[in-house]
Image (cartoon, coloured by chain):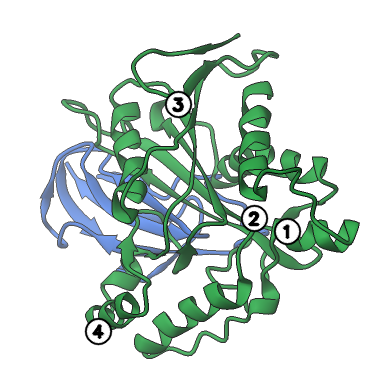
Chain colours: A blue, B green
């Protein structure tokens, strides 16, 4: 199982406590290929693409509009 | 060293004097006469070029009157009606790729876009990118006696913690997008970062704020944005000097020239 995280240190949580997952481009349990954009994070007027770190079956852990912080685990990919 | 390239007009390639950064930057004073949508789309096109190997670029540009909204606004249920209404009021709507909410473009608002490859920016945070984008603007403002800093501003349109603010009022708005999978034949981080700032140089704060408020009212939301939350470079100069001496050239041209110099000399 490969974990999908919001990059650690992406923003300063002292200034902006949290962001949200603004979109998932694949359904739960969908097959994804390594490197494709699977989700978008919205934080502090920034849209940030999240790529699949591996190929496999996507298990979404944070739904659309769910709150995230740097380092948050948002999905797992069953390889 | 600064040199003009032959392939794109009004563009310079610049290596910072201190050479701390491995990036060579193009500084593009973009005076091309676009329609409003093409002017915004040019940033995305630049991103694709840069993801495919073109140098990182600062682009200075202006736009005709339009309301530039995010994709989040564009998927709201009443968007089509709001768009039609605003276009009838002389405010065409363009959807942008960066985050945030609606921001007005028109003559007197100066834009600075910064575009770089994601592969060149692995260690950067969102804050780093906002700082890189705004440093040259802050330098220009400082030269004019205007101290600016990052802050949110209550009742300002498209508010965020990384507005440029002076005296508690917003003088520039900022936003970013980090795109992946852009480069042809590559995957992952071979995309681009686009950061954008809009500096209010010489524009009617009431008119632009009213346009934003109208748009959101049509979407069914009273945003409570207020013109007193916005300040322009002209307002600041008039407050400091009692008048705003344009020295025979429009203020926007003066600021544009100063920004180009700040970028090529940093």
Judging from the image, what secondary structure is the residue with disc 4 in?
A: helix
The reply, left or right, for residue B4 in relation to residue B96 is: right
The reply to whether dot 3 and dot 1 touch (C-beta < 8 Å) is no
Question: What subunit carries mark 4?
Answer: B
Badge 1, how many Cα within 10 Å: few under 14, some, many 20+?
many
Q: Against B238, is B76 above or below? A: below
Question: What subunit carries mark 3?
Answer: B
Mark 2 vs mark 4: in front: 2
Q: Quadrant of the N terminus of chain A?
A: top left
Q: Are marks 2 and 4 on the same chain?
A: yes
Judging from the image, what secondary structure is the residue with disc 2 in?
A: loop
Q: Position of residue B247 (x, y in %)?
A: 76, 43
**Front residue of this view, candidates B163 and B228:** B228
Q: Residue at x 30, y 54 (%)?
A: B37
Give the residue number, with chain letter if any, for mark 3: B56
Give the residue number, with chain letter if any, for mark 1: B234
Q: Against B264, is B31 above or below? A: below
Q: Position of residue B49 (x, y in %)?
A: 30, 28
Q: CA distance from mark 1 to mark 4?
A: 35 Å
Q: CA distance from mark 1 to mark 2?
A: 6 Å
User: Mark 3 vs mark 1: which is more N-terminal?
Assistant: 3
Q: Position of residue B130 (x, y in %)?
A: 59, 45
Give the residue number, with chain letter if any, for mark 2: B201
Q: CA distance from mark 2 to mark 4?
A: 31 Å
Q: Against A55, is B49 above or below? A: above
User: Mark 1 vs mark 4: which is more N-terminal?
Assistant: 4
Mark 3 vs mark 1: in front: 1
**Front residue of this view, candidates B87 and B136:** B87
Q: Against A63, is B210 above or below? A: below
Q: How many marks?
A: 4
Give the residue number, with chain letter if any, for mark 4: B81
The answer to whether any part of residue B10 appears in the image is yes
């Amino acid at each position: 199982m490969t974990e999908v995280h919001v990059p650690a240190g992406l923003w300063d949580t002292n200034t902006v406590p949290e962001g949200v997952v603004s979109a998932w481009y694949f359904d739960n349990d969908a097959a994804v290929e390594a490197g494709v954009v699977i989700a978008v994070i919205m934080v502090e007027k920034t849209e940030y693409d999240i790529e699949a770190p591996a190929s496999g079956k996507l298990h979404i852990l944070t739904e659309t509009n769910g709150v995230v912080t740097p380092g948050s685990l948002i999905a797992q990919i069953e390889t | 060293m600064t040199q003009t390239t032959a392939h794109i007009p009004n563009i310079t390639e610049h290596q910072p004097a201190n050479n701390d950064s491995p990036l060579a930057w193009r500084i593009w004073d973009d005076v091309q006469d676009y329609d409003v949508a093409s002017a915004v789309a040019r940033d995305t096109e630049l991103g694709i070029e840069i993801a495919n190997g073109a140098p990182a670029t600062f682009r200075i540009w202006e736009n005709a009157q339009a309301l530039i909204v995010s994709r989040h606004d564009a998927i709201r249920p009443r968007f089509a009606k709001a768009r039609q209404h605003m276009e009838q009021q002389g405010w065409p709507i363009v959807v942008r790729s960066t985050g945030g909410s609606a921001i007005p473009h028109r003559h007197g608002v100066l834009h600075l876009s910064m575009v770089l490859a994601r592969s060149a920016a692995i260690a950067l945070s969102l804050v780093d990118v906002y700082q890189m984008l705004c440093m040259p603007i802050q330098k220009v403002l400082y030269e004019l006696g205007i101290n600016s800093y990052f802050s949110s501003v209550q009742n300002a349109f498209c508010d965020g913690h990384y507005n440029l603010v002076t005296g508690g009022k917003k003088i520039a708005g900022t936003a970013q997008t980090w795109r992946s999978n852009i480069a042809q034949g590559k995957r992952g981080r071979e995309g681009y970062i686009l950061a954008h700032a809009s500096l209010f140089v010489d524009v009617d704060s009431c008119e632009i704020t009213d346009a934003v408020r109208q748009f959101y009212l049509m979407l069914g939301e009273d945003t409570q944005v207020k013109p007193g939350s916005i300040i322009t470079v002209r307002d600041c100069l008039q407050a400091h000097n009692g008048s705003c001496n344009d020295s025979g050239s429009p203020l926007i041209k003066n600021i544009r020239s100063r920004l180009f110099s700040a970028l090529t000399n940093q």
